[in-house]
Image (cartoon, rainbow, N blue to C red):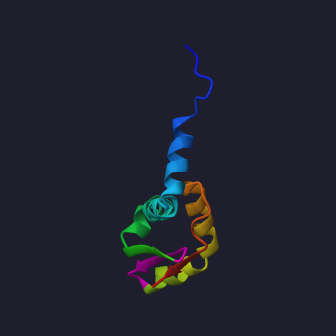
């Protein structure tokens, strides 16, 4: 039996998340989780708190020298995180 009005489950889930206002928080969570992959294991050793506020990924870096180096790569890091998430979630990355 072939259904004429069948839709893909992925589309239905996206529609549900969007309708319930859960799409942005889910993407922000994915952005925080993708920091570990984008930064790599060496930088992850010096990383503290990671959180998103108003589209800005805030990352605590324990080494001042590393923080300065990462500041020069902010736009590249934001682009790579958004590519991992699959949506334009992060507008800026800030280090503190």
> The N terminus is located in which quarter?
top right
The answer to which image quadrant residue 74 occupies is bottom right
Foreground residue, 23 or 49? 23
- Let me know if residue 73 appears in the view: no
Secondary structure character of the magenta stretch overall = strand
Vertical arrangement, residue 10 with respect to residue 5, above or below: below
- Asked whether residue 16 is drawn in magenta, I would say no
x, y percent for residue 9:
51, 37
x, y percent for residue 21:
50, 61
The answer to which image quadrant residue 76 occupies is bottom right
Q: In this rendering, would 15 be left or right of 45?
A: right
Rendered residue at 61%/73% (across/down) = 91
Vertical arrangement, residue 6 with respect to residue 17, above or below: above
> The C terminus is located in which quarter?
bottom left
x, y percent for residue 78:
59, 68
Foreground residue, 49 or 30? 30
Vertical arrangement, residue 16 with respect to residue 44, above or below: above
Q: How many marks?
A: 0
Rendered residue at 50%/50% (across/down) = 16
Magenta span covers which residues?
A: 54-63
Q: In this rendering, would 39 be left or right of 89?
A: left
Rendered residue at 51%/58% (across/down) = 23
- Let me know if residue 87 appears in the view: yes
Q: In this rendering, would 19 be left or right of 60?
A: right
x, y percent for residue 83:
60, 57
């Amino acid at each position: 039996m072939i259904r004429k009005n069948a839709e893909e489950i992925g589309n239905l889930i996206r529609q549900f998340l969007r309708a319930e206002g859960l799409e942005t928080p889910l993407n922000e969570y994915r952005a925080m989780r993708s920091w570990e992959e984008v930064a790599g294991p060496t930088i992850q050793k010096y990383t503290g708190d990671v959180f998103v506020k108003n589209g800005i990924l805030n990352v605590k870096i324990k080494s001042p020298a590393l923080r300065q180096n990462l500041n020069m790569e902010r736009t590249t890091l934001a682009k790579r995180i958004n590519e991992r998430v699959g949506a334009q979630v992060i507008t800026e990355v800030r280090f503190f």
